Amino acid sequence: MASEAPPRWDRKMQQRLARGEAAALGELYDRFASLVHGLAHRVLDDEDAADRITREVFGYIWEHPDAYDPKQGPLRSWVASITHRQAVQRLRQTESELMRLRGGDGAAERIEAKVREASMAARADYIRSSMPASLRAALDLAYFKHLDYRQTAADLGVTEDEARRRLRLGLQLLSTAHRDVEAPRPGQGSPR
């Protein structure tokens, strides 16, 4: 889904990176390092591996700034997709090595199941962190504090209808987390 007018910051950042401005990479790191590390950690469940993925992602961005096309979507989404791709690749490598050492039938299926589960969780985290603050606040109250829509409305200072609308929209957005990571049907290859 390409946007017609990419945000100005995204365009300027891509141009600065293409010119080789080290300060631009620092700004990009400051803005997205927690996103990259969080997504990598969510997929890999390993602090050291998430640190390595974070370094690799920003290294890739520094070496390939022209790989980002602002017309294709936000820079944040591009950075997240690079992170997800590298983390999943690392997870597959790690799990393959473990399965090979343990030996066992069905190793490929178990690896892909673990990749799908981690991918869905990482995508849900990304969707939640990217949604507007009003939706995120409503979901946080309902999920983490176990409040119903009436209590959520009172805490947020909005009408009950507005609280229901925010919760419904937030849940609809989260429900898309499985969209790109569904299990392959028989006869199909693994998702890539």
Image: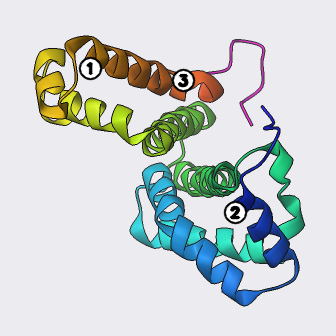
Which residue is pictured at 71% across the width and 77% down the height? Answer: 59
Label 2: how many Cα within 10 Å (few below 14, some 14–19, many 20+): few
Residue 12 horizontal/vertical position (percent): 78, 68
User: Which numbered tag is attached to residue 192?
Assistant: none
From the viewer's perspective, is residue 54 above or below residue 4? Answer: below
- Helix, strand or loop at mark 2: helix
Residue type, label 1: Ala
Which one is in front, 64 or 103? 64
Which residue is pictured at 41% across the width and 56% down the height? Answer: 45
Residue 93 horizontal/vertical position (percent): 63, 56
From the viewer's perspective, is residue 62 above or below residue 123? Answer: below
Mark 1 or mark 3, earlier in chain? 1
Tell me the mark number nearer the camera, choosing from 1 and 3: 1
Residue 16 horizontal/vertical position (percent): 80, 77
Residue 64 visible from this viewpoint: no
Visual colour scheme: rainbow
User: Which numbered tag is attached to residue 176?
Assistant: 3
Q: Residue furthest bottom?
A: 22
Which one is in front, 80 or 93? 80
Give residue 82's quadrant in the image. Answer: bottom right
Label 3: how many Cα within 10 Å (few below 14, some 14–19, many 20+): some
Residue 176 visible from this viewpoint: yes
Which residue is pictured at 77% across the width and 25% down the height? Answer: 189
Q: Are marks 2 and 1 in contact (CB under 8 Å)?
A: no
Q: Would you name the residue on which mark 2 appears?
A: 9
Q: Main secondary structure of the magenta part?
A: loop
Give residue 141's quadrant in the image. Answer: top left
- Helix, strand or loop at mark 3: helix
Quarter in which the C terminus is drawn: top right
